[in-house]
Image: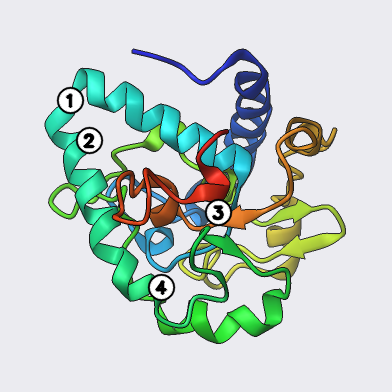
């Protein structure tokens, strides 16, 4: 099976190893298990690196399991009319606007929408090895830059604050993602837009077509 390109593999290795350490520290406080889809509902911004990786994953899945790949693409395309209604950005390109606060009501409104990569029958991600960094770092408490993000609401229930902090990790301490993003640009989109393929609005959304 194809794998992410070498530059991306190093980033994923660092992040995955760090999150494995977070899971080891958390032990039974961590509720994340295969089939738990708490973090697989509701759209969220992904960057160009995430979008490129997802498309590479779709290409790989098309070779190994074309029927499953078609199902992912169909689910993504089915969501476009929903996501384009009130889209907080440019609907022609799929690029989100810079003002995240104005987008909050939009994301809240679509909070129950399942990720198109989520298999509704198995409760598993069809593009798990290619998933965005947000998906990889959800669950334990993490630090992203200056922000200390809380754990998933299902995890650490009843845990003392000190116990939570003892499990906090910084997934990308050396800024590898920023260096990989520098030549790609800072624009963000949504997973459904990245996976929609032929959406009827051109081959795919313009800003993310030539990654």
Relative to 143, is 34 on the left or the right? left
Q: Does residue 198 lie above or below 110 as drawn?
A: above
Spatial CA distance of label 1 from label 2 is: 6 Å
Instruction: Specify which label sits upstream in the sequence, 1 or 3.
Output: 1
Q: Which residue is mark 1?
A: 65
Q: What whole-number distance in Å separates the C-alpha atoms at marks 4 and 3? A: 26 Å
Question: Which residue is label 4 attached to?
Answer: 84
> Crowding near pointer 1: few (<14 within 10 Å), some, many (20+)?
few
| Residue appearing at x 17%, y 25% in the figure | 65
Question: Where is residue 9, by image quadrant?
Answer: top right
Q: Which mark is residue 29?
A: none
4 or 3: mark nearer the eye = 4
Residue drawn at point x = 51 percent, y = 33 percent: 53
The residue that appears at 69% across and 81% down in the rendered structure is: 101
Measured from the top left, where is residue 73 in percent x and y? 25, 46
- Does the rendering let one see residue 24? no
């Amino acid at each position: 099976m194809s794998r992410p390109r070498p530059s991306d593999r190093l980033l994923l290795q660092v992040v995955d190893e760090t999150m494995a350490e977070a899971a080891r520290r958390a032990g039974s406080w961590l509720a994340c298990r295969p089939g738990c889809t708490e973090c697989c509902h509701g759209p969220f911004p992904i960057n160009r690196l995430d979008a490129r990786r997802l498309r590479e994953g779709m290409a790989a899945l098309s070779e190994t399991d074309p029927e499953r790949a078609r199902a992912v693409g169909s689910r993504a395309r089915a969501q476009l009319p929903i996501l384009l209604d009130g889209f907080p950005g440019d609907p022609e390109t799929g690029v989100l606007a810079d003002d995240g606060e104005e987008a909050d009501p939009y994301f809240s409104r679509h909070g129950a929408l399942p990720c198109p990569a989520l298999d509704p029958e198995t409760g598993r991600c069809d593009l798990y090895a290619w998933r965005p960094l947000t998906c990889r770092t959800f669950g334990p408490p993490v630090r992203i830059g200056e922000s200390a993000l809380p754990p998933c609401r299902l995890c650490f229930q009843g845990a003392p604050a000190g116990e939570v902090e003892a499990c906090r990790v910084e997934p990308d301490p050396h800024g590898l993602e920023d260096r990989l993003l520098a030549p790609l640009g800072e624009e963000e989109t949504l997973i459904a837009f990245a996976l929609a393929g032929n959406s009827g609005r051109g081959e795919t959304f313009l800003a993310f077509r030539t990654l």
